[in-house]
Amino acid sequence: MQTLKDSELRYRRLFEAAQDGILILDAATGMIEDVNPYLIKMLGFSSKELKEKKLWQVGAFKNIKASKAAFEALQEDEYIRYDNLPLKTKSGQLIQVEFISNVYLVGGKKVIQCIIRNNTEYKRVLVALGENEKKYRDLVNQSPDGMFIIGMSGKLLTVNKAMCSQLKYSEQEFLSMKIWDILPKQFYDQYRKRIKKILNGESVGEAVEYEVRGKDGKIHYVDVISAPHYSGKNIVGYQGIARDISPRKRDERKIRQQLAHLTALSAIDRAINANFDLKLSLSEVLIHVTTELEIDAADILVLNSHSPILELSAGRGFRSKTIMKTQIPMGESYAGRVILERQLVHIPNLSDEPDNLFPKSFLAEEEFVCYFGVPLIVKGQVNGVLEIFHRAALEPDTEWLDFLNAMAGQAAIAIENSTLFEGLQRSNLELALAYDATIEGWSRALDLRDKETAWHTQRATEITVNLARVLGLSETELVQVRWGALLHDIGKMGVPDEILHKPGPLTDEEWVVMKKHPTYAYEMLAPIRYLRLALDIPYCHHERWDGTGYPNGLKGTQIPLAARIFAVVDVWDSLTSDRPYRAAWTEKKAREHIHASSGTHFDPQVVDAFMQIPIN
Ligand code: C2E
Ligand code: SIN
Ligand code: SIN
Ligand code: FE
Ligand code: FE
């Protein structure tokens, strides 16, 4: 009963705070039962003028026939949507709204819920694009989003300042160009189809994502909303707003890259453990090095333990066969220098060094532009070199270099394994360290998307591990707890930005999506063998002691201990941080909340322990 009350209250709050108009009708009679404050403000009618009337008795919905027809249709099927419904406010102003309605059963009674969203402002800006008055031009030029008008032939007719600064073309330059100059070929078809629809006056619905090329050759990702451009009554072109979403895209790519890196590590780990054939293990390393780092060629040279000679053990991506038989003397090669200096050698442009140590014929055939040599070090001993070659310039970032180093570590371990069996234990430790670094990097990328400050999850993880140690978990279990905590919200990758970054409370529909994040985490991590035991936290951290949590409604000790421990820290951590949807609480208030939730949300024993450990 209490839960029913709670959910009623919550619904009420959502209804009242919503930034869309909401209208509830009795499905049997068509009578308006409830209307939220936002709609009252939008329409200017008082709650009294709206309630206890049929829709078509209110001045706003003055098209009686249409309203009745829609009402009847709603009683038949269950969903109606208008993109552009004209409504009249009390003061007589015409507004265009998006109108969505659904039929629900509430306590055995059928009701219709209508969501009404005002699009007038945004439409006005689009229309303004077509006009010449200065005030509109200023408005357009102050917009942080790109805005443009394109003629029938694809010629750019108008662009605003943001378009120019994003893509680095001057207005002059733009006006002598066509859309085809900035749109990559693979988008031509999609663009032509859309423009055909727009020119026919058909609705093209939601925003579309394109890539466009700036003057500096850089690709920008843009979200484009578009509409026909009129001259008098004729459609003469196409106008739109292009929002640069490149930063978001870059974050997404980073997250995907981390996942690929982790999977690669896992595959290599399997290969190294499954066979003691060194060449096979090293080939596996090179497959991942070339694909993940997107480079043309790589090889691994192993140091002969009896003489100062490097032997090529595996190579990939070379044109010439000659390299495959090379034995390289230490003194006259970059690889030798890598070994002696025990550090990375990077040559950004081989043609800048006419006296470089590579044979001329080799470079002529391969056409390599840049080179990296990384020492393979295990237990303080150098046992080989990983060499990377690329036929264009490279601008590596930290992730790239981290992965390169992790791969060098793996290769070193493979070489070590093949010669020393007693080294096995140690290698496992090295492997765990490589995993750890990757998982930490991954966790930081996730925090950025969640609009957390980086290292935030790191701190929560440390608290969790301390708490778990106090509660008696073994050191082996703590490793898994640590990984689980670092990745606890990885499932939020499946939650769209609009929901994750929403500044206000979530609607019921949005909660449905948000509550899927533990299940998404399970689906993503379960295939990674190394993380199987770390899954408890990502999957079960929103279960509650009293059984009212999600996704499975587990109760009491049915919930894995690691998840019960983490749940306390997660809430503490969330409450003491600024979130898009609310400001941080004080630590005192957060502690009181946790104390008060002992036995309902949280395991009382975990709360007791939490209250005793120092936190800073
Ligand atoms: P999160 O921000 O990491 O929050 C984790 C958990 O901390 C929440 O799980 C909840 O148990 C607790 N918590 C966080 N903030 C508050 C608060 O202000 N009051 C109370 N009493 N508890 C709080 P929950 O509720 O299952 O939420 C899961 C995730 O859903 C949150 O992760 C957050 O990403 C998102 N979320 C929750 N509420 C909202 C909201 O109102 N707006 C938006 N945009 N997202 C929300
Ligand atoms: C309207 O067309 O005016 C409203 C449709 C409805 O009754 O849901
Ligand atoms: C743009 O000009 O930024 C994109 C135009 C479009 O494809 O609609
Ligand atoms: Fe979560
Ligand atoms: Fe969280």
Image (tube, helix red, strand yellow):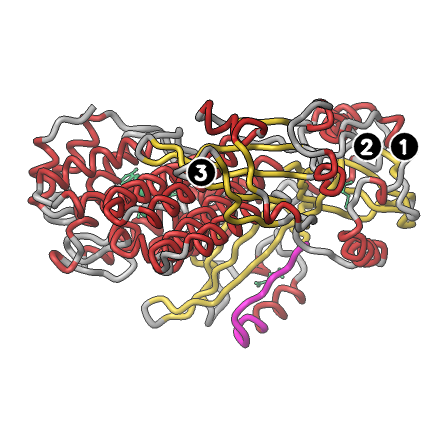
Q: Callout 2: 10 Å neighbours few (<14), some, many (20+)?
A: many
Q: Disc number at residue 303?
A: 3
Q: Residue at x 62, y 37 (%)?
A: 246
In the image, what residue type sits under mark 3?
A: Leu
Q: Is residue 36 left or right of residue 327?
A: left
**Of pointers 2 and 1, the one earlier in the residue sequence:** 2
Whichever of callouts 3 and 2 sits on the residue coming sooner in the sequence is 2
Give the x, y percent position of residue 389.
62, 38
Above/below status of 298 relative to 276: above
Number of the front mark, 3 or 1: 3
State left or right for residue 341 relative to residue 116. Answer: left
The part of the image, by quadrant, that contains residue 8 is: bottom left
Q: Quadrant of residue 332?
A: top right
Q: Which mark is residue 175?
A: 1
Report how far apart the C-alphas of labels 2 and 1 lie in the structure. Answer: 8 Å
- Does residue 150 belong to the magenta stretch? no
The residue indicated by pointer 2 is 159
Viewer-nearest residue: 183 or 25: 183
Question: Looking at the image, in which quadrant does ligand 2 appear?
Answer: bottom right
Does residue 156 show up?
A: yes
Q: Residue at x 32, y 28 (%)?
A: 584
> Residue at the spot x=85%, y=58% of the render?
200
The magenta-colored residue range is: 73-84
Nearer the camera: disc 3 or disc 2: 3
Q: Secondary structure at mark 3?
A: strand
- In the image, what residue type sits under mark 1? Leu
Kindly indicate whether the residue at mark 2 contacts the one at mark 3 (C-beta within 8 angstroms).
Answer: no
